[in-house]
Image: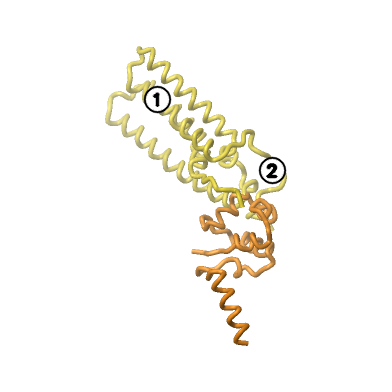
Chain colours: A orange, B yellow
Amino acid sequence: MVHNRISLFRAEKGLSRKELAAAVGVNPQTIGFIERGDYQPSCELALKLAQTFGVPVEALFSLSPFPPLSEQLGARSQGATNA
Amino acid sequence: MRDTSSPAKGAPKPTFRHGPRTGKALAVVALGGLPLWFALKFALPSESGVVEVVSALAALAGVVCGIVLFVGTYGFWANAPAAMLDERQAAERDQAYIQSFRVLALVLLAGWFGAEITDLASAQVLRNLLLVLFFLTLILPSAVTALRDVALDDAD
């Protein structure tokens, strides 16, 4: 299974599903299906999504579940404190 | 290189647009109408005026809903060239055709089996069955596409 955090990036960019769908050239429902994990996009669409958000494709998709945002932020601030 | 993830720009639109709920309702009536007409004609006495009226209404409702479904969103989805669909829609359409093929094969097998083991399959019954099969062949991919579609909340 491929996990993704498109909804997180979409919220951060302030994009609606319709706007993101228009940016990558798919139906808005398709974005919803991908976000819910009900549809696995092709390599081409995954790359387009990553390009739209300006991040590498691994930042959007992963074979293992993404850690919760709070955990990531906690780890980052812990690292900054240690440094 | 051909873009396989996006629909073609400026693609034609379906004549009628309907949502998943309407599509499902149309599909159920379209798929039920003519088979019900066939079953009533086959199983019940044709001299009965009530049966004739009910079977005619079932056939009419099935055909009308089938036509609306066929020229609407799901008929468009099921019959449009791949270039007009995005990759998920194309994949869904492929699945709908596979399921339609299986259903039609089963109906054909059931029809053949019924004709083989009973003496009731007159030429008229077989003509009616062929009409139902023709109609099913036309609308089944659209109906399966409608039945498989899931309504997502578009709110962000």
Displayed quadrant of residue B55: top left
Looking at marks 2 and 1 on the same chain, the residue that comes earlier in the sequence is marked by: 2
Q: Are marks 2 and 1 on the same chain?
A: yes
Where does the image place residue B61, in percent across and percent down from the top left?
Answer: 49, 25
Where does the image place residue B15, in percent across and percent down from the top left?
Answer: 64, 33
Which chain is disc 2 placed on? B
Numbered marks: total: 2
| In the rendered image, the vertical position of residue B150 relative to residue B121, given as above or below | below
Q: Residues within 10 Å of mark 1 (few under 14, many from 20)?
A: some
Residue at image x 28%, y 24%?
A: B119
Please state which amino acid type lies under the numbered disc 2.
Answer: Ala
Displayed quadrant of residue B77: top right
- Depth order, front residue of B26/B129: B26
Where does the image place residue B25, in percent across and percent down from the top left?
Answer: 49, 34
Tag 1 residue: B38
Disc marking residue B11 = 2
Cα separation, mark 2 vs mark 1, equals 38 Å
- Depth order, front residue of A15/B148: A15
